[in-house]
Image: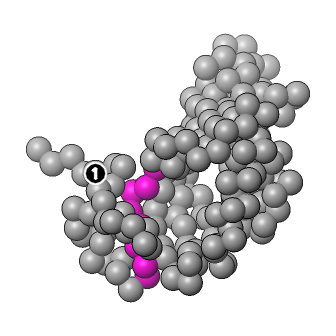
Amino acid sequence: MELSERVKRLEDRVELNDLVVSYFLAADGDDLEGVSNSFTETATFSASGIVTGEGRQGIVDFIRASREHMGLTIHTPHYAQFTFDGADHASGLIGAHLELVLGGTAIYGAVRYVDRYIRDADQWRIQARDMRTVHIAPWLEVGEAFESDTPVRWPGTQASSSDFPRKIR
């Protein structure tokens, strides 16, 4: 790979990282225009493989409706691993913690976003995002949930296994 291509790849990594952070800040700040700008026109948003929003406007509508049941939220990214599939396509795995109030209950958990990105009008955008839950529970139940076989405990739902269960030999 030529030096100019290597420099461009580094610039792309920084732009993708900025996109990840911008999305989290927009979501936490109820900035629906910022959320919209994070996605392509034909993007999809999923949770544990179930599509919850299709197209930029569909995703914004899903986020808006979800935020109506939320109080304060904090998305904290911890790592971002990007893989390039050409000059204008990339995949990413984003590890993050969530702190949020959902339906009057404070919850805490860890998620991984499985993303696909494309360069759209000279700007990286999310083409597909699937939020996969590692663990999540009301604050007072986090320890119990985390050490169990059912660490996914969204308020009002049945406890379930992690999207990333530990593989024991």
**Residue 139 horizontal side relative to residue 2, left or right:** left
Range of the magenta residues?
Answer: 132-139
Q: Residue at x 30, y 60 (%)?
A: 160
Give the main secondary structure of the magenta stretch: strand
Give the image quarter of residue 4. Answer: top right
How many residues crowd around disc 1 within 10 Å: few (fewer than 14), some, or many (20 or more)?
few
Amino acid type at image mark 1: Pro
Question: Can residue 14 be seen here?
Answer: no
Assess whether residue 136 is covered by the magenta stretch.
yes
Placement of the C terminus among the 4 image quadrants: top left
Question: Can residue 51 be seen here?
Answer: yes
**Residue 33 horizontal side relative to residue 154, left or right:** right
Q: Position of residue 69 (x, y in %)?
A: 63, 73
Give the image quarter of residue 68. Answer: bottom right
Q: Position of residue 91 (x, y in %)?
A: 58, 31
> Which of 58 and 6 lies nearest the eye of the viewer?
58
Q: Residue at x 64, y 74 (%)?
A: 70
Query: The residue tagged with tag 1: helix, strand or loop?
Result: loop
Q: Residue furthest top?
A: 1
Placement of the N terminus among the 4 image quadrants: top right
96 shown above or below 127 = below
Q: Residue at x 87, y 28 (%)?
A: 122
Q: Position of residue 83 (x, y in %)?
A: 57, 29
Assess whether residue 52 is covered by the magenta stretch.
no
